[in-house]
Structures are given as structure tokens and as C-alpha cells.
Amino acid sequence: MANITLDNVSFTYDSSGTVREDSLVLKDINLAINKGEFVCVIGSSGCGKSTLIRLLEGLNFPTLGKIMINDKEVKGPGKDRCVVFQHYSLFRWFTAKENVAFGIKQNKKDLSRKEIEESAVDYLNKVGLENYHDTYPFQMSGGQQQRVVIARALAMDPDILLMDEPFGAVDARTRSTLQDMLLQICENEQKKRTVVFITHDFDEAIFLSTRVIFMQPKKIRDEITVDFGSRRVRADIFRSDDFNRLRNQLMSYFYEDIGEKLDITGASL
């Protein structure tokens, strides 16, 4: 059964009430995401990826069509979903532990103060910040701050994790470390979460996901299944023929998209 369903979803930021073709950001999007899937959405800038995340979060609503989560139409933000953005969005006057605890309080109001603190510490430890519980964001690197954000999101215990280019602001080495960390947590947690992950990076999309959604302006160009199993070894995957085949396929779609925008023909790898 699909955890998330988009049924003929179109969207425009035009508030005039008239749906014009040239104003649509998304058009006739149909997509089903099953519980526990790790889906990466990729495509060129301006194709509607971040708008899709906002619709899933319930910050905006479809102009046409509907979005269903667990058979209920999305009417606004919910405790079953949590978003991780590219920018760290931490309270700078809170320590790492206090930032995570604040998130838990919003979603789990029945927990005692002790239980909240224990959960905050547990998730900080899971993301490798055992020695940073009482550290403030300004004392941490960008990668460490993003670990706190991910710890907070996971500690809020959502069914669905929405991630909008969460590793886009860190260097390549830190990005690889965060990718490995996220996969390890998703694999080892008892709760099977659904992840929708926006990225510009082809390698990242293939390495992380069970399915890649390639978007072109307003629409889905293709859905590609990625079958590397659950225990992924970076070096083995990046050297494999399947990885190169998938990467070339995504690159061909990208250049096809660029060719259409520039009104040129013959673009190829």
C-alpha cells in the first residue's frame, strides 16, 4: 500500500484563481511512494523539486488534484512528517541537546522532561555527536550542525522524512560522511521510515535511494529503480557497471532537459 500518493497534482503560485499553462510549476503529477522507500528526486534548477516538498509538507496545497498520506488527504503540516532543509535552522541560543529536545517537545507532549532529554541524547549519539551535547551551534562545523538537525528530525519520530538538499551546504568529504550516516541510521532503526530526498547530485541520488524520480520542468520524466540492496558499500557501488549505467541514464535526461531549454539539438554524453 502506498504511503504517499499524488493524484493528478498541478500547482501554480498564481493567486488569481485562473489556472494558466504558463503559470504552472507542476502539471499532472502522478506518483506513489510505498512505506519504507528511500526516494530521491532530481532534476535541473526550477523544475519544481522544492515545490513538491512544500506540497508534501502541507505548506502549500495543490491547485488541482490531491495528495494522500496514509489514505488521508494532506490539509496542512502534520506530526507524521518532518522536513530537513539545506540550511541548518537551529536555535543558536540552544545547545545541541536543547535543540533536539525542543523538537521532541513539539511532537511528543506526553513525555516527561527526563524522557525528552534521554531521547535527545540518544539521537545525538546516533549521529556521532556524543561529545557535543552541550555545544552551541556557533561552536560547531556545518556538518556537525546538520547532524543536529537530522537528530532532531529523527527524534520527533515522523513516519515520513522530507529532505530538501540537506547536504548541499557542506564540503564533499563531509557530504559523503553524512550520506553514510543517514543510510546507516535508516537501515538500523526498527522503525521503517519513508524518505523523500531532494538533490542535484546524481551520485548521491543513486547511492542513497531505492528509486530515483527525475523531474523536468513541471513533470516527472522517469522513475528509475535502484537495486543495490540495503547494506551499501560506497566503493563497491561506485565501481559497478550498474552505477555507471544509472548515472549515464540520468545524465542523458539532464542534457535532454538543458537542450530543450536552450532550444538546441544533438546534445549527448
Image (tube, grey):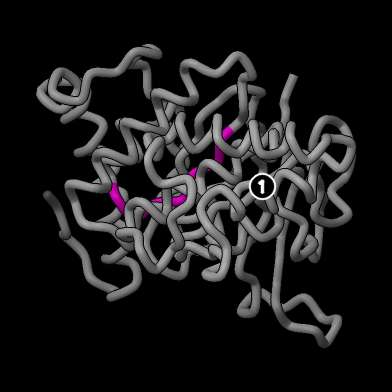
- Pinpoint residue 29: horizontal percent, then vertical percent: 65, 50
Which amino acid type is marked by label 1?
A: Ala
In terms of depth relative to the viewer, which is nearer, 187 or 30? Answer: 187
Residue at x 76%, y 43% (from the top left corner)? 7
The answer to whether 237 appears left or right of 260 in the picture is left
Can residue 221 be seen at all in this image of the molecule? no
Task: Give the secondary structure at mark 1.
Answer: helix
- Pinpoint residue 88: horizontal percent, then vertical percent: 47, 62
- Pinpoint residue 212: horizontal percent, then vertical percent: 43, 36
Q: Is residue 47 magenta?
A: no
Magenta highlight range:
195-201
- Pinpoint residue 200: horizontal percent, then vertical percent: 34, 55
**Majority SS type along the magenta span:** strand
> In the figure, 153 relative to 262: above or below?
above
In terms of depth relative to the viewer, which is nearer, 115 or 219? Answer: 115
- For mark 1, what is the residue? 101
Residue at x 11%, y 49% (from the top left corner)? 269
| Quadrant including the N terminus | top right
Residue at x 41%, y 33% (from the top left corner)? 182
Q: Quadrant of residue 136?
A: bottom left
The answer to whether 45 appears left or right of 189 in the picture is left
Q: Could you classify mark 1 by the number of other residues whose Cα lies within 10 Å: few (under 14), some (14-19), or many (20 or more)? A: many
Q: Does the magenta stretch include residue 196?
A: yes
